[in-house]
Image (cartoon, helix red, strand yellow):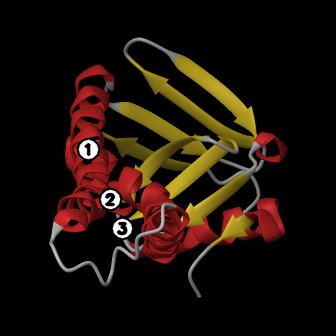
Amino acid sequence: MENQQKIKVEVNAKAADYRRILFWYHWKRLVLAGFLWLIIFPAFIWVLGLSSGVNPFSSENNSPFLILTVFGLLPVLVGFSVYFSIWRQAKKNERISKKAIFVFDENGLKTKSESSSSQMKWDRLAKICETKKDFIFFPQENIFYTVPKISFQNDEQLDDFKKLIREKLGEKAKLKN
């Protein structure tokens, strides 16, 4: 790659792009919470039942069934809640975001839209992650924005970008192959 080559990308992120990134960002937490719930919930019910002198799993009537059903449905309800909140957040992000021009060069990245502009040096980024369809920039650990891969003009520009990222960020660049 030549010195001072600039990679210019026009990004117009849609709700589907934000939704994809939000699901990517939260999926590990959701799976971990669900897994822990499956481990902790039966033990909790067992201990609670035994401490009250009743074994809820060997009751002759179905009185614990209602409680087990309610507690068993809680993770499903939380999952739906998270799912729909991600949908709402993605739509909100699409409404407030504007088409932006990103320029990547040796010094860092610059963004410009009709309502704002910014500039950031490479060392200010916490990390950049590549997914199947996006590059996700993390200026801070819990703050991120996306550049969809479809925003790049061609594969050569995409390869130049990845080469620049590897050179400037080293281990902070979580890129595929």
Q: Is residue 153 above or below residue 144?
A: below
Q: Earlier in the sequence, mark 1 or mark 3?
A: 1
State if disc 3 and disc 1 touch (CB < 8 Å).
Answer: no
Quarter of the picture holding the C terminus? bottom right
- Name the residue beneath numbered marker 1: 81
Amino acid beneath label 2: Pro
Calculate the distance from the C-alpha at mark 1 to the C-alpha at mark 3. Answer: 25 Å
Percent of width and height locating residue 137: 59, 49
Q: Secondary structure at mark 1?
A: helix
Residue at figure coordinates x 26%, y 78% from the top left: 59
Mark 1 residue type: Ser
Which of the numbered marks, if any, corresponds to residue 31? none
Depth check, mark 2 against mark 3: the one in front is 2
Q: Position of residue 117 (x, y in %)?
A: 54, 19
Q: Which mark is residue 133?
A: 3
Find residue 16 and report its horizontal and vertical position in percent: 21, 50
Sequence order check: which comes first, mark 2 or mark 3?
2
Q: Residue at x 54, y 69 (%)?
A: 47
Image: 130 above or below 57: above
3D distance between C-alphas at marks 2 and 3: 29 Å
Q: Nearer the viewer, mark 1 or mark 3?
A: 1
Mark 3 residue type: Lys
- On the question of residue 25 being in view, the answer is yes
Q: Considering depth in this image, is 129 or 113 the residue closer to the camera? A: 129
